[in-house]
Amino acid sequence: MNTVTIKPLEHKGTQVIGIYFEKDIKLNIVLQKAVAAKWSKTNKCWYMDCTKETCNKLRIAVKGIAELDGKAMQDYFKQNTQNPVKTHINASKNNASNAQGDFNTNYNPSQQVEANNKTVKKTTPTIRICDANAEALAKFNQTLVLKGYSPNTIRTYVSEFGLFLQTLGKITADSFTTERIKAYLYYCHTTLKLSENTIHSRMNALKFYYEQVLGREKFFWEIPRPKKPYLLPKVISEQKILKGLQNIDNLKHKAILFTAYSAGLRVSEVVKIKIADIDSDRMQIRIEAAKGKKDRMVTLAEATLVVLRAYFEQYKPKKYLFEGQDVEEHYSPRSAQAVFNQQFERIGLPKYFSFHSLRHSYATHLLENGTDIKYIQELLGHNDIKTTLRYTHVSKKAIEKIESPLDKILRKNEGEKDE
């Protein structure tokens, strides 16, 4: 069995964790999916974020595949007590937690508090999970990786399942029956007061564990799911879109937003476009391994091609169309989101709009301009036509023909006065 050694490493002025092992293609894939590891040509090794969280994720991911030698990192963390430990913060603000594994098999709930107008972290006492449940968490993570789930899905599922294990204490997860799961979810509703979306995520994680890891068939059929709120897509008007796109000074930022709106792309799709994906002859862009690991072709607008050619001439990217600080890596989705926020806040757009609103707006504007809903479904890469049909509820095409009774009454009243 291969041995994976992790050591402190300074990379481009930043403290990271170097990962060393003999050449192993399977390990390469596991590292990229489980801990978002990157390859350093200078140091001839893989590296990842320097936190106890990533050490724990690595330990779980390689279990059964390789031996992990983490002594150097254990010594490092002991000597650097001020080194911050990242924690998962649940979107519903329900005391999110983070497993530290063999480096410290605890959950460390952390919450943000305001003090003297500065955001500081306040750490509460750790709650230990039993060894049997720690083993369950390891198997859970390993199964997710081996089944090829995306890093985002793995991160969400591990976080939700970890919070469930934290609640159990010494009770083992594999001993839970359907009725006990129902009681736990009732606790999530009534005591934790989690949102419907958070409960759905936790149920998905639990369903994966009991049905995929433990192999229990139809374990969740008897457990009802909460009804999700029906939220309409947030759409930006054509006038606001045009105003936002025209007033961009930075050519790279302009190219990113032009590409996103003109092709209706997700932020993760925009930043991962490679130069080879641009087909100017057929006026198409290839979107590779998008959501659901599906490839698709989208239209390349003439106006976008003009902007991209000017951008390419100035920036000369090598592989990815939009490069990050490291030319071998793509632009980060978070940075792209910041570009959107900065630009569209300048024109007075409310803060509840996001980068994804460009995609919603693209679909709605296509529908209003007469494009068939089936074509829109293909361009967006939706599996289910019901997902695309949401845009019929925000399109003004049919609604603008309907007159409000108030306007009709007032107009009738004005006509009677004239007589």
Image (cartoon, helix red, strand yellow):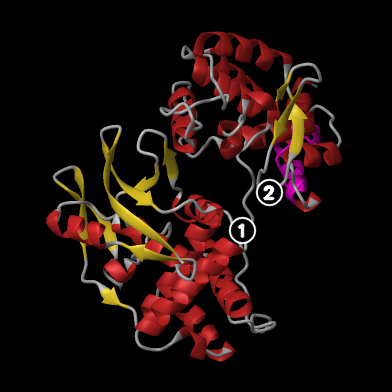
Q: Earlier in the sequence, mark 1 or mark 2?
A: 1
- Disc 1: which residue: 148
Mark carried by residue 295: none
- Give the quarter of the figure containing the C terminus: top right
Q: Amino acid at mark 2?
A: Lys
Label 2 sits on a secondary structure element that is loop
Q: Quadrant of residue 162?
A: bottom left
Q: Amino acid at mark 1?
A: Gly
Report the span colored magenta. Answer: 387-406
Q: Horizontal and vertical percent for residue 297?
A: 76, 33
Q: Quadrant of residue 373?
A: top right
- The residue at the point 46 percent across, 48 percent down is 36
- Disc 2: which residue: 293
Q: Quadrant of residue 301?
A: top right
Q: Disc 1, disc 2: CB below 8 Å?
A: yes
Residue 262 appears in the figure: no
- The residue at the point 34 percent across, 79 percent down is 129
In the figure, 204 relative to 116: above or below?
A: below
Q: Horizontal and vertical percent for residue 48?
A: 37, 47
